[in-house]
Every structure is written in structure tokens, then in C-alpha cells.
Image (cartoon, grey):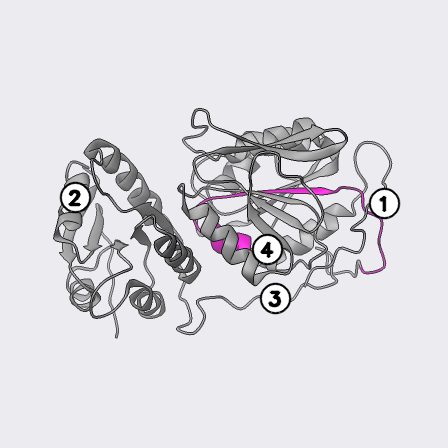
Amino acid sequence: MSFEGSGAKRIRVLIVDDSAVVRRLLSDALSGEADIEVVGTAPDPFVARDKILELSPDVLTLDIEMPRMNGLTFLKRVMHYQPMPVIIISSLGQAGCAATVEALRLGAVDVLGKPHGPYSVGDLSLQLANKVRLAAAANVKRKSMGTGTEPVVPVAGQSVAGQSVAGSTLICRHLVAIGSSTGGTQAVELVLSRFGADCPPILVAQHIPAGFSRAFAQRLNQLLPMEVKEAEEGDVVQPGRVLIAPGNFHMLLRKNSGSYQVAIKDGPLVCYQRPSVDVLFGSVAQVAGADSVAVILTGMGSDGAQGMKRVRDAGGWTIAQDEASCVVYGMPREAVRAGGVEESFHLNRIAAAIESALRRPSHRGAAHKLPYQNTSIR
């Protein structure tokens, strides 16, 4: 299987779905967008392959459950032979959510729940068009046909400067908050994979639709040595635990009887997002202040920029992913522009940067030892 590509002024979209009804709904949803053109549709991956060759789309929307070849197999081939931005259109069932998380790992840049029932055409048009625009700006890279992962640079036992930190056991900060969006599921997984079971408490706000966040957390929990779970109201923030904000809800840090907990809240969209990175980081700045490390990873838009500034102003340490390693260098760029970023690193170096920041003397008060003082990064 081989492909060819070309550029275009309008964003050229190819819709791949075995349902004629869904193909029509998606096509109609984009028909009124002046900057987007649906150049074709396909009922299965074999027809899609031919249309990619013929039409050179900029963005692909892809169903997972299809005849002749499933969407995951086709996605692997697309990302190997002709990498392009892919939006997964997935059902909200347990199997569909799990498959979608796997698709994001394989290189898909975004996900949208499959339209069904009395789905508002206006809502679908707005959501899909925005996702297409974000996808078209993504820096998509070639993937191996094997695992869908990129080779990484070992960072075990090294600080961000390449100097050993193994002999330094004094912990100065004890809470990590991470925010990400487009391309973030892969980035978050890579960063977390460098930590052991004794990781510091980590809170993650990833822009992801309702339903998919639980599958994302469950997958990470199966793969990684620490506990990873979708956050629930009142969950205790503790060493060895990563809490993922549930889709369509904000996650905030609270302090109760001397311990940190999370609050899960509804409420308006912030920077067009729920969960919002700004909401999480803002609460971290207010509650944890200088005891925190805030990290902003790949993503489109400005969510997290003001929150990063608040964390930095409160004495916390702030780290951004650099442009070269981002799928979309939007959120990190805006955080830098807002003055909220202490330092920026390639994704492969983010875990080591967190390790260094945990041991960096705080702007306020004296350093103190904590139960996870032997935090290790693999």
C-alpha cells in the first residue's frame, strides 16, 4: 500500500464509514464551511485507499468497525505509508472507547462520538468543523507498522542537564499537574511511562470527549506500574497515583484535613474546553502553590496559558513541551507568550525535567522530605 499527497487552500476531507447515513451526516455537517471541502467518501478502507491516491485529502475521518478491514488496521497502514491527520468517528460503547484510545496511540489526532439518534446537526457541524481545522494544523509523523510508537531517548537517572540526580533524594515539590490536547494521549503516556510505581501524585487534564477518558485511564493503568484512574469526586491525591480528569467535567485540586483531594465539577466551558487545563492549573496554583510542578504538552489553542502563569507566580515550577516534538504547538506557545513557562524541552526530556523540578529548591520556604523521596524515572 502506498500513497501520495498534495496541498490545497481549502482543507480537503475524505470521510470513511461503512454507514451511508453517517457518511451523509458528516458530509452535510461540513457542507456549509467555506474553508473545508469534502472531496469524497468511502464505505471501507479499500475504497478509501484508492480515493486517497486519487483525491489527496488533507484530513481523514475514520470509522473503526468496518467490513473487509477494520479501522485500526487501516490506520496503521495510513500512518506508515502516508501520514496524515486522522479523526476517529467512534461509538461510545466500551469496546468503541477502548478501540478509539488505541487509535489515538497509533497516531490519530482527535476523536468524535458517532452521531446517533436526535443528534443536533448544528452541534455536529460546529464540533466536526473545529476538529477538522485543528487536525489540519497537526504535525503528523510516520509510525512503525509494528507498535505505533516512536523510539525514545533513555532518561533514567538523569536531570534535564544530563547530570545524575540519583544521589539527590531531597524532594522540594510534591505534586505534578499535566495539561494536553491534540496529540496529548500519546504524549501523556510517554511521560508517565518514565516513572515507576513510586511516582509523585500526578493530575492530568487531557481534552477528550466524555466516555473516552475512562478507557484512556484504564489502558494506562494496565500498561504502567502506578495506579491510573479516571478521577472521581473526593479522590485522594497521593504518591503512586495518577488521576485523569473525566471527559466533559472540570477537575480541581482541593485541600481537606491536611491532604489533597480532587473535586469534579460541571460548569461552563473554559477556553472552549471541559475539562480545562486552566481550571486545573488555577486550582493547583491556589492550593499547592510552590509545592507544584505544572507541565503543558501538545495541543491547539490557549487553554492552560493563564493557569501556567498562576502556578509560576505562586512559586511552582513550569515546563512546556517544545515545538519540534509537539503534534500541535499551540498551548505550549501561548503559555510561553503569557510568561508562564520556566523551561521548554523535547517530549523525550519532559519526564527528566519533572524529576529535576521536584528536587529543585522552592522559591518559598525550605525543602522537605516526603514518602516518595526515591521517585524513579525509567
Between circles 4 and 2, the one closer to the viewer is 2
Instruction: Answer with left or right where residue 180 lies relative to residue 76.
Output: right
Instruction: Answer with left or right where residue 373 lies relative to residue 279.
Output: right
8 and 44: which is toward the camera:
44
For label 3, count other residues whose C-alpha is less than 10 Å away and answer few (under 14), some (14-19) or many (20+).
few
Q: Measured along the vertical axis of the image, is residue 250 above or below residue 139?
A: above
Q: Measured along the vertical axis of the image, is residue 303 above or below residue 206?
A: above
Name the spot of residue 219 as percent of width and height, x first: 50, 57
Q: Mark 4 points at which residue?
A: 191
Label 1 to label 3: alpha-carbon separation: 29 Å
Q: Name the residue under label 3.
A: 153
Between circles 1 and 3, the one closer to the viewer is 1
Which callout, 1 or 2, points at the residue further toward the start of the chain?
2
- Contact, CB < 8 Å: mark 1 with mark 2? no
The residue stretch that appears in magenta: 166-189
Label 4 to label 2: alpha-carbon separation: 37 Å
Instruction: Say if the magenta span includes residue 352.
Output: no
